[in-house]
Amino acid sequence: MSQMHQLSACPGCEEPLESGDLFCGVCGYDLSAVPPPPQDRPTIAVGSPAGGTAWPAAGGGRPPMGEPPAIRFDTPATDSGDFELPAPAPAPEPVPEPDPVPASGPVPASGPVPASGPGPASGPGPVPASPEPAGQAPLGGSAPDPRAGGLTPAPPAGTRLCVACRAGRVDPDGYCENCGHAQPRERDHMEEELGSVAAVSDRGLRHHRNEDAFAVSSTALPDGSPAVVAIVCDGVSSATRPDEASAAAAAAANESLLRALPRGTHPQAAMHEAIVAAAAAVNALADDDGQGATDHDPHHQPHRNAPACTLVGAVVAGGLLVVGWVGDSRAYWVPDDRGAPPARLTEDDSWAAQMVAAGLMNEAEAYADERAHAITGWLGADAYELDPHTAAFKPDRPGVVVVCTDGLWNYAEGARDMARVVPPDAADRPLHSAQVLVGHALDGGGHDNVTVAVLPFAMAPEGAVSA
Amino acid sequence: MANFSKSNVPRFSVEVYQNEYLPEGGREVNAIVTVTSTGGGTTGGVPLAGASLSPSSIPGRAPTAAVVIMVDCSGSMDYPPTKMRNARDATAAAIDTLRDGVAFAVVAGTHVAAEVYPGGGRLAIADARTRAQAKDALRRLSAGGGTAIGTWLRLTDRLLNSAGVPIRHGILLTDGRNEHEAPEDLRAALDACAGRFTCDARGVGTDWEVKEVTAVASALLGTADIVADPAGLAADFTRMMENAMGKEVADVALRLWTPVGAEIVFVKQVAPAVEELTDRRTEAGPRAGDYPTGSWGDESRDYHVCVRVPQAGIGQEMLAARVSLILPDPAGGTAGPPAQGLVRAVWTEDMAASTSINPQVAHYTGQAELAHVIQQGLDARKSGDFDGATAKLGRAVQLAAASGNADTAKLLSKVVDVVDAATGTVRLKAKVAEADEMTLETRSTKTVRVKK
């Protein structure tokens, strides 16, 4: 029941589609991974007009621009204590009069595609907060059905037809028996919505596989109040099996948090433990690797180029917002009241960030360097040492946490840029927002895998904060 | 206790080495496919001498292997007379190496082929008695007559295929040119025999034609070599026979599936020796073809597969080829799931990924070029093109040195004076022993594996 695609007919064979179809039931056309013609990508449309029209209040976000940002967690928040998200200084002018012109300014993409915009934005009438999270299970769960069901072109029941040539069957290795093309894999596009948190991951347009992974979950603290978790990992492409590394790390961190939080472990300590657990899971992959390869190459060094990935996680529990990370995946704070300043909550383990932190270069110089994006921290057996960063915040207003890989933030680097592309109703429709954000990255070129989790932070009803 | 009812067909494994990344617009996919067979609990890779538990040696059971030895008995074998004597001794040594239970025969080759032992169009079953009888029969061998190798092969084919034995092998010894039949006759005989038995070929002395002997071995998927000094024959025959006795499965084919729109640029064996297989394809179902590889014991061979695929966009991935091994139906045996490997193509904009060459592919591309330039260099030398010969053989010296092919480098150094191996600077030797030149030519296709 993805609301991502609102096509009425398959672009390949004109077969009418039902909302939620991930593949055309007749020809197998992949409606998500194969880049469709522009009008097939509702994410463009949803994103831009939302910024341009349905979001007049967003203009309010701009006035403070001239002032020193109220919240920038530029200082490394390494395992530091809690610090509160201060009430934004520019609060006095939170809702200056709506100004649609500047609002559309920051979203130049809205220009080229205004026509298609309103349709998808309004037409689909996506139900806010889909009532059936089960339907949002990762793509794999639902993928086989549209392929297998209702096929008219005569192949025996149960056969999968190639999405590329639509003539060959798919062999057990996932390639077409006719044209050889790799079939969309489960991980090419994944979506999950669980209660109030949602995540979307996409292969992007230029990479042949998705090496990102995520996990979202919710549990309860000992006092019965909810705790919501989002983890996002980005496999390091230059290492071996990055896809396995990210999947292992996301799963391990998630499980660790689900064990620790109900026991009453402080969320920040739980996040620290989760990163350690994720690192162990990724390290274990390197050991597997060593055994497999020794046969052929006696000089194989299992720890050289061992599987590796980044990790960023966020937990909302007990009125706290806790983030933890290793590498250059990020978390952003975007208040529901767009008049309040947004913030980046993480500090990259990257060459550029280190240069800036050490005072050796200014930000512009550092990020212009070709080494800028080289990461200096990661999970993996060949990491120098594991240095998990965690930070806890106590926001004074509701908002959403955007937890993402660089596949997204490369297209919305600053906190304000990010806030601009987050739909105004993100807190109510996290899955839709995550889809919009992934769409923003794809519109920008989709040069990397894109993974986004949107985790709303609601103000606890008075008295619920037991701390 | 060995379980004799169990199949002894070896287990095959396939590994693929390639850089699957192609740049935008890239179409050519190269891969080295390493095929390894490990025996079904019989020899463990160790050549057998004497008694063994191999299926072919079990008393009372039908033999599973048959060998025919073809000995050149043309008039030239008497010059010098030691040649005939050495050939007789070598054949006797080979017969001694036959395992009990293996079917065998000895053929004398001149301008016609004659059965020496056991005769009557049959094969003998090796045991102490038949081995002694066969060696006795060798005494009757005498030199006289011409050379028509095609006739020897056709007789061998009849004998080997009379017994319904799965592993069929020939050993051919010649000392002279195939003068008493037209080249087409030999070609036709090879075509007729290809796929029906495998054959190792040896040239003794220096009066034979390298291309004839290598053509026999190549067509019949065996090895070719020179035994310049007849005194070395016995040891060589023993080794050859041990190798033949180690074979456990015959008629293995390499099957290549390629997608629609793809074309196979070439398929060749690259280790232990270069052997072009591209034109030996037999179709095997839609978009699949089989390439013969002969019989296998415990061994490992490498193949270089080059496929041209239709181009696809950045981020796309496709299967460029599926490589699998086709074994003859092991009657009642369990061959296990067929071994296979995947050759993939992935288009990327990462130039570092798409421009790097897989080390195995690079190595064997160099080894194949090495074999080729040696051949070209020797041909140029024979035709009097000394500049061309110097250039080609210089390149060969460079390639042999860079790839660590020490055997070939040594053979080259007997034909050229190496000034600088790294740059391939050489001078042709003024005087080259004929045996050295023939050895280089015969062994030019031998390769080494990637340096570890």
Image: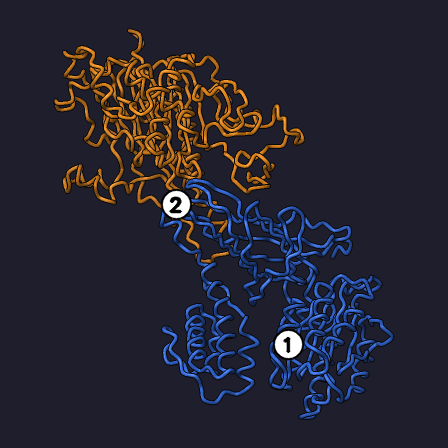
Chain colours: A orange, B blue
Quadrant that contains the C terminus of chain A: top left
Where in the figure is residue A338, as x and y percent of width and height?
24, 16
Depth check: A442 or A214 in front? A442
Chain letter behind tag 2: A
Depth check: A292 or B255 in front? B255
Identify residue for label 1: B212
Give the vertical position of A295 relative to A439 (above or below): below
Tag 1: residue type? Answer: Glu
Counting every numbered tag in the picture gives 2
Where in the figure is residue A120, as x and y percent of width and height?
40, 17
Q: Is residue A264 visible?
A: no
Q: Residue at x 21, y 16 (%)?
A: A59
Q: Residue at x 73, y 67 (%)?
A: B193
Label 2, label 1: how far apart the Cα atoms are: 51 Å
Give the vertical position of B404 relative to A453 (above or below): below
Where in the figure is residue B9, as x and y percent of width and height?
70, 56
Chain letter behind tag 1: B
Identify residue for label 2: A239
Q: Nearer the viewer, mark 2 or mark 1?
A: 1
Q: Residue furthest bottom?
A: B80
Helix or strand or loop: what does disc 1 sit on?
A: helix
Q: Residue at x 60, y 85 (%)?
A: B206
Is A360 placed left or right of A371 in the picture? left
User: Crowding at label 2, few (<14), some or many (≥20) Cα neighbours within 10 Å?
Assistant: some
